[in-house]
């Protein structure tokens, strides 16, 4: 079919099929001019046609690009079986090679897209394929294993189940389009979706009828927790530094993959023309309204993000100096955008704030002491906001929605230790990565420790800012599991991700320590078993000891930026 678009001459829209090295054909739709070769913007998606309608096809064509929107293997109209992540590198490289052979392609290709659509970009960019000149990944993890499926060893149950529910529904829809009998699969999925809260609590975790017969990845992810060879074979993490093309990395302060977006940028920063944009956004929402806050001027539209992305890709194709600043961040609390030259900021004052045994938080090292709490995996601390991607709701509340949310609904719990500063005399800006160093012991064979940074307002509101988790046996990394000895003290580093938040004068800074954040993460049984092996009969109540003072201090490291001092 042919037609016209504003500012675009006659163009052609056609369905194409791209052959791959193993004989599977990948379906796509290409939009290109009717005369002369062009650079191509490639989007590879597993989400089928309905979720592709928001892609910037017309703006890309206005900028002089041909556009190929391709269904990943086993999705949409493409042949083959969809096995999450497993074929994206080879299929992406085959598609790039095919594009270079097309008469309407001038040999220069860029890639665009968010989440999975960003992962497929990183899957190929480190291979330095011929013709690929720029990428624009949005809200994209740095690693499949410890970054997407797990976080410092804890299984990311909430986002994993939410994604598989969505993808299972799409897969069943695709099967229906092909004429398959979907009655049984749809019935199982509807049962699961009817009571997501029950699905979160169902054990053992691999048994999720409605998902497992549609998507093998759910069981694969859980069965390969302790199998680094499987994940290393898929991962693009180690190859990112070899990427030799420009990149525009976009993330959100409340996106589940923020750590990955920031690490992708810093890892690839040695390559010229790397850029970073981080707004007050979640994984799927860039309106600037997230959690219990409206961030004035914080929307993607306010900074014309899509136009920036298309302009960046066009400048890369034309080998022109970019017009974008290296880093753009939205400073929450100040509620304004700011440009920077790097990330983390070179002018950061890295401050250590110590946790005290009497519930204090301050710059002075407390005396040696310890305190304790009891963690019961039967009654985990419920997820209340944060950088999350969950589905469902708890008693009709909004705790499963991302963003900064009031933590006072957790005030009655005795399995959370709270450490609070005195009221601030002046505003303090915290911009950068945040970690908690915790010296702790557990009575169990394994456990989790969680940490959360909280902004306590004068009226009592306690707004969560960032949080993180570490699984005890993975305290030195998932490739080197080390079981704990019950009762023995270890030092744990909990990565809380990053933020840009102004704590106002009169507010107090608080750190909350616990051992669960459910259903964002699975419940650590305390038995030492892997996540996919646990049943409720394995649950062990644990007594947790937190230590303070010289030699075994527990503290948070805050990246403080002098207010009024710019780069």
Image (cartoon, rainbow, N blue to C red):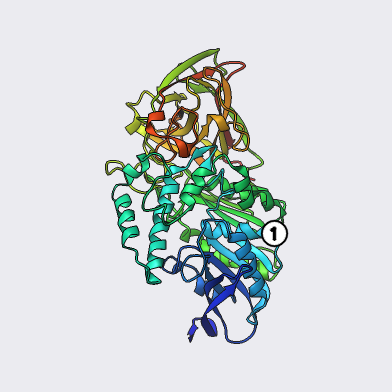
Which quarter shows the C terminus?
Answer: top right
Q: Total number of numbered labels?
A: 1
- Regarding residue 461, the answer to whether it shows in the image is no
Q: Residue at x 67, y 77 (%)?
A: 101
**x and y percentages locating residue 86 in the rendered image:** 57, 56
**x and y percentages locating residue 497 in the rendered image:** 54, 40
Horizontally, is 421 left or right of 179 in the view?
Answer: right
Q: Is residue 248 above or below residue 227?
A: below
Q: In front here: 21 or 95?
A: 21
**x and y percentages locating residue 226 in the rendered image:** 57, 39
User: Mark 1 falls on what kind of element?
Assistant: loop
**x and y percentages locating residue 26 in the rendered image:** 54, 71
Question: On the image, numbered disc 1 is attached to which residue?
Answer: 127
Q: Residue at x 55, y 67 (%)?
A: 43
Q: Residue at x 49, y 52 (%)?
A: 217
Q: Residues within 10 Å of mark 1 (few under 14, many from 20)?
A: some
Q: Is residue 88 above or below residue 452?
A: below
- Regarding residue 138, the answer to whether it shows in the image is yes
């Amino acid at each position: 079919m042919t037609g016209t678009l504003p500012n675009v001459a006659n163009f052609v829209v056609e369905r194409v099929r791209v052959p791959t090295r193993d004989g599977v054909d990948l379906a796509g739709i290409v939009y290109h001019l009717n005369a002369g070769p062009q650079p191509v913007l490639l989007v590879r998606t597993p989400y089928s046609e309905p979720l592709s309608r928001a892609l910037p096809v017309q703006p890309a064509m206005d900028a002089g690009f041909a556009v190929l929107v391709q269904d990943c293997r086993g999705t949409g109209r493409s042949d083959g079986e969809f096995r999450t992540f497993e074929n994206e590198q080879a299929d992406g490289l085959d598609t790039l090679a095919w594009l270079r052979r097309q008469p309407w392609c001038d040999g220069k290709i860029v890639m665009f897209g968010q989440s999975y659509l960003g992962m497929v970009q990183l899957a190929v960019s480190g291979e330095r394929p011929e013709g690929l000149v720029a990428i624009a990944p949005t809200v994209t993890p740095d690693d499949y294993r410890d970054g997407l499926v797990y976080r410092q060893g804890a299984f990311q149950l909430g986002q994993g189940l939410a994604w598989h529910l969505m993808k299972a529904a799409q897969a069943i829809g695709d099967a229906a389009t092909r004429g398959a009998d979907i009655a049984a699969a749809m019935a199982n999925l509807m049962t699961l979706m009817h009571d997501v809260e029950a699905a979160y609590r169902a054990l053992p975790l691999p048994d999720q009828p409605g998902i497992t017969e549609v998507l093998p990845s759910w069981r694969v992810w859980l069965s390969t927790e302790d199998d680094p060879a499987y994940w290393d074979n898929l991962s693009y993490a180690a190859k990112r530094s070899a990427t030799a093309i420009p990149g525009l990395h976009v993330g959100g302060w409340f996106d589940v993959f923020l750590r990955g977006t920031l690490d992708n940028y810093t890892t690839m920063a040695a390559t010229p023309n790397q850029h970073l944009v981080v707004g007050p956004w979640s994984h799927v929402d860039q309106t600037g309204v997230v959690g219990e806050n409206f961030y004035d001027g914080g929307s993607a539209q306010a900074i014309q993000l899509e136009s920036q992305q298309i302009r960046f890709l066009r400048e890369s194709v034309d080998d022109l100096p970019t017009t974008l600043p290296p880093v753009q961040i939205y400073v929450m609390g100040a509620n304004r955008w700011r440009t920077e030259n790097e990330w983390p900021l070179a002018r950061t004052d890295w401050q250590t704030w110590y946790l005290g045994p009497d519930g204090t938080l301050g710059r002075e090292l407390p005396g040696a002491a310890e305190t304790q709490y009891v963690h019961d995996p039967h009654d985990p601390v419920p997820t209340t906001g944060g950088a999350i991607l969950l589905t469902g709701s708890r008693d009709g509340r909004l705790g499963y929605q991302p963003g900064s949310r009031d933590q006072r609904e957790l005030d009655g719990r005795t399995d959370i230790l709270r450490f609070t500063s005195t009221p601030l005399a002046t505003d303090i800006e915290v911009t950068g990565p945040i970690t908690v160093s915790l010296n702790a012991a557990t009575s169990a064979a394994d456990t989790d420790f969680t940490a959360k940074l909280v902004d306590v307002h004068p009226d009592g509101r306690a707004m969560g800012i960032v949080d993180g988790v570490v699984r005890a046996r993975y305290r030195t990394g998932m490739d080197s599991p080390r079981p704990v000895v019950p009762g023995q003290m270890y030092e744990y580093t909990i990565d809380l991700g990053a933020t840009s938040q102004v704590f106002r004068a009169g507010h107090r800074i608080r750190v909350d320590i616990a051992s669960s954040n459910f259903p964002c993460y699975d419940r650590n049984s305390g038995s030492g078993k892997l996540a996919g092996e646990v049943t409720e009969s394995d649950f062990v109540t644990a007594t947790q000891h937190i230590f303070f003072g010289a030699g075994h201090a527990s503290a948070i490291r805050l990246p403080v930026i002098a207010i009024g001092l710019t780069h």
